[in-house]
């Protein structure tokens, strides 16, 4: 079997993991990128942060595979030739990890776990009240690959789930709202709001005071989309006023989050360092091998980012 070269231009610390995963794919020859190397004949590139000038220097390049679901950084890179498809990652490990993280945080907000943690720290026996899951409407901004799977996981636990997207979805159990005009109705009475949107010009700054004011007072926010979706000052103000009770943030406008940032010390903000969910190296490379197989046999690539839409 002839092997297809796939140029790996990810962070060096991941290379050994990817090389190990590639060993079970006899059709793929994973080649580590080194500045100055001969790129002639290499048709496929794997990267998640743009390496300046690399795509433009690969004259035989046919496609770029992103190892994450969000392709905002690659789409914003002006030196990637417009005709080169950028493929975003859709992979069961990534999807499962995201549903798991959001369920964990939704249950944390639903049961106000911090009250128990505080009581335990003080040695207080403090039984507390919480409503039934079916009395807690949960809304998901972005009802795509990750949003739908996450919604289905929350449904299993009894939460009423609704979602917001550009195009209306047909789903038996998730109420679908579409477009800016239906955003207020989507937000009304929500107690837990999850952001799983891609970062585009239309969604930048969407998590702001105006949006928070449309939720039920005392609602919680889970942002696993991108840090730039959130207006940070508006979140702090909404937490101070009680319009929001708490927030879980996995993504930040500046990563790593600076040491003096007020989020670090806020008692109602839970944070994780942008790894709510990661692509499984073996599953992700397997998916790329499947897509390369399609490309080599003249079939269209799947999950290609649409440059005009921005995701
Ligand atoms: N924190 C992490 O560890 C992590 C990991 C993976 C992904 N992510 C983030 O999650 C995002 C979503 O990933 P995905 O695979 O679910 O993407 P996806 O399948 O492309 O879904 C995106 C969803 O957002 C909706 N949308 C986009 N722009 C919109 C707008 N202006 N108004 C309303 N809805 C809009 C889309 O609507 P349509 O369905 O109508 O097109 C779609 O439902 C990624 O872009 C990334 O930023 C974060």
Image (tube, grey):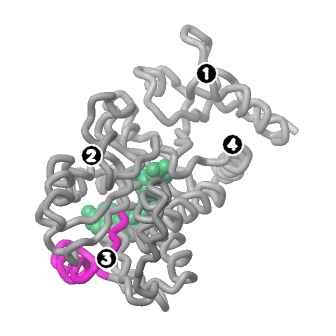
Residue 311 visible somewhere in the drawing: no
Which callout, 3 or 4, points at the residue further toward the start of the chain? 3
Horizontal arrangement in the rendering, residue 165 relative to residue 170 (left or right)? left
Horizontal arrangement in the rendering, residue 78 relative to residue 285 (left or right)? left
Disc 3 secondary structure class: loop
Specify the quadrant that holds the N terminus: top right
Residue 110 lies within the magenta run = no
Disc 2 secondary structure class: helix
Looking at the image, the residue that sits furthest to the right is: 1
Picture disc at residue 281: 4
Q: Which of 180 and 261 is in front in this view?
A: 261
Task: Give the residue drawn at x 29%, y 47%.
Answer: 266
Q: Position of residue 37 (x, y in %)?
A: 60, 11
Q: Name the residue under label 1.
A: 12
Cα separation, mark 3 vs mark 4, equals: 35 Å
Q: Ligand 1: which quarter? A: bottom left
Disc 1 secondary structure class: helix
Horizontal arrangement in the rendering, residue 17 relative to residue 108 (left or right)? right
Which callout, 1 or 2, points at the residue further toward the start of the chain? 1
Task: Tell me where the magenta segment starts and ends, as one range.
Answer: 177-194
Q: Mark 2 points at which residue?
A: 228
Closer to the observer: label 3 or label 4? 3
């Amino acid at each position: 079997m002839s092997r297809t070269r796939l140029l790996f231009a990810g962070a060096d610390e991941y290379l050994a993991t990817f090389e190990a995963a590639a060993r079970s794919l006899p059709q793929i020859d994973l080649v580590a990128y080194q500045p100055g190397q001969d790129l002639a004949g290499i048709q496929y590139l794997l990267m998640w942060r743009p390496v300046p000038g690399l795509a433009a220097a690969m004259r035989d390049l046919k496609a770029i595979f992103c190892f994450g679901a969000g392709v905002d950084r690659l789409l914003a890179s002006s030196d990637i030739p417009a005709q080169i498809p950028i493929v975003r990652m859709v992979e069961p490990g990534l999807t499962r990890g995201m549903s798991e993280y959001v369920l964990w945080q939704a249950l944390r907000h639903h049961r106000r776990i911090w009250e128990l943690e505080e009581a335990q720290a003080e040695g207080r026996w403090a039984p507390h009240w919480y409503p039934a899951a079916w009395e807690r409407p949960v809304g998901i901004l972005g009802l795509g690959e990750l949003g739908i799977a996450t919604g289905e996981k929350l449904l299993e636990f009894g939460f009423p789930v609704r979602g917001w997207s550009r195009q209306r979805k047909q789903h038996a159990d998730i109420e679908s709202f579409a477009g800016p005009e239906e955003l207020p109705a989507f937000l009304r009475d929500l107690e837990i709001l999850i952001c799983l949107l891609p970062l585009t010009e239309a969604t930048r700054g969407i998590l702001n005071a105006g949006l928070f004011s449309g939720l039920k007072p005392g609602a919680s926010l889970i942002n696993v989309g991108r840090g730039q979706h959130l207006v940070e000052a508006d979140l702090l103000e909404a937490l101070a006023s009680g319009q929001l009770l708490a927030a879980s943030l996995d993504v930040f406008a500046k990563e790593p989050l600076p040491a003096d940032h007020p989020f670090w010390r806020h008692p109602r903000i839970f944070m994780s360092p942008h790894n709510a969910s990661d692509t499984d190296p073996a599953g992700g490379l397997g998916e790329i091998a499947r897509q390369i197989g399609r490309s080599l046999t003249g079939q269209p690539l799947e999950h290609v980012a649409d440059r005009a839409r921005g995701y």
